[in-house]
Amino acid sequence: MSYSIQLYTLRNAIQEDLPGTIRKVAEIGFTQVEPYNFVATAKELGAELKENGLTAPSGHAPLLSQDQDEIFAAAKDLGISTVIDPFIPADRWQTAEDIQATAAGLNAAAKKGAEYGIRVGYHNHAWELESSIEGRTALEFFADLLDPELVLEVDTYWVAVGGQDPVDILAKLGDRVKLIHIKDGPLNTDTKAQLPAGRGKVPVLDVIAAATSLEVGVVEFDDYAGDIFEGIAESLAYLNNNDASATAAEGARA
C-alpha cells in the first residue's frame, strides 16, 4: 500500500519552516505528500520535495473558485497528477440543483485539467453524508453526475462523523474512489480530539480493504492536541506494521 501525508496537517510547521518540515516528513518515512493551496508555494515546495526525495501524486486546490490554468500549471510543475477540490460548503449540498451545478463545474474543470495531463477529483467532509437527495447521500448522488474520468478522495473520518459507515460508502462508490484520507478519533467535530490511526473508533484496516481501487492512502489530521510529528509518525508506523503483518500472513498461507 502506498501512503502519503496531507500537508495541511503540518500547516503551522510549514508556515514557520517549510524546508525543515519537509525534511522531517522524509525522515519519518513518508515518500509522498499531498500539498494544499500549492500555487503560492509551488517553486519553494518543489525544490524541497526534490531535495528530500519526495513526490506529490495528488494535491488540493479550490478549482471552482480560483484560476484553473494557474492551478494546473503549478500542479504540473510539482508533478501532481491528480488535483482535488477539497471543499464545497455545506449549503451547496442541500438540493439536487446545487449538486448538479457543482458536478457540472468539476466536469468542466476535468476537461481543462486533461489539457495538462492532470486528473480532477473531489474530497468530502461530513455534510455530503448528512444530506440526503432522492433517498441517497448527497455524495452518492453527486458521484453519479460526474464524468467517468473524475475521481473521489473519500475522507473516511468525515464519512463516519456524517453518520454513515465508511466501509459501506466505499463499497457503494466503488472504482470511483482512488484516494482516501486516513484519520482516526472519537467521530465528532472536535478536530483536536483526532488521534493517530488505530487509536480511535474508525476501523482503519477495514476501511482500507474496502477501497478496492485505491491508489494512495493519505494520512491526515485536521488538528491534534499532541505533537503533530509524533502523531503522523505513529499513524505511518501503524499502517506499515499492519501491511507487513498482512504480507507475512499471505506468505504463510501460500
Image: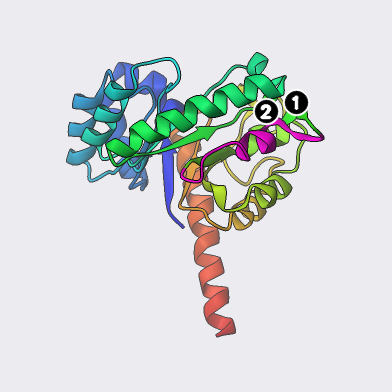
10 Å crowding of disc 2: few (<14), some (14-19), many (20+): many
Image coords of residue 33 (percent x, y): 36, 39
Q: Indicate the amino acid at tag 2.
A: Glu
- Residue at (34, 31) in percent of width and height: 112
Per the rendered image, the range of residues in magenta is: 135-149
Q: From where the camera sits, is residue 86 visible?
A: no
Q: Indicate the amino acid at tag 1.
A: Ser
10 Å crowding of disc 1: few (<14), some (14-19), many (20+): some
Residue that carries the numbered disc 2 in the rendered image: 128
Residue 10 among those drawn in magenta = no
Marks 1/2 in contact by CB < 8 Å: the verdict is yes
Q: Which mark is residue 225?
A: none
User: For this rendering, which residue is in front, 79 or 143?
Assistant: 143
Residue 138 among those drawn in magenta = yes
SS at badge 2: helix
SS at badge 1: loop
Image coords of residue 36 (percent x, y): 39, 26
User: For this rendering, which residue is in front, 72 or 242?
Assistant: 72
| Left or right of residue 26, residue 210 in this image | right
| Left or right of residue 45, residue 224 in this image | right
Residue that carries the numbered disc 1 in the rendered image: 131
Q: From where the camera sits, is residue 157 visible?
A: yes
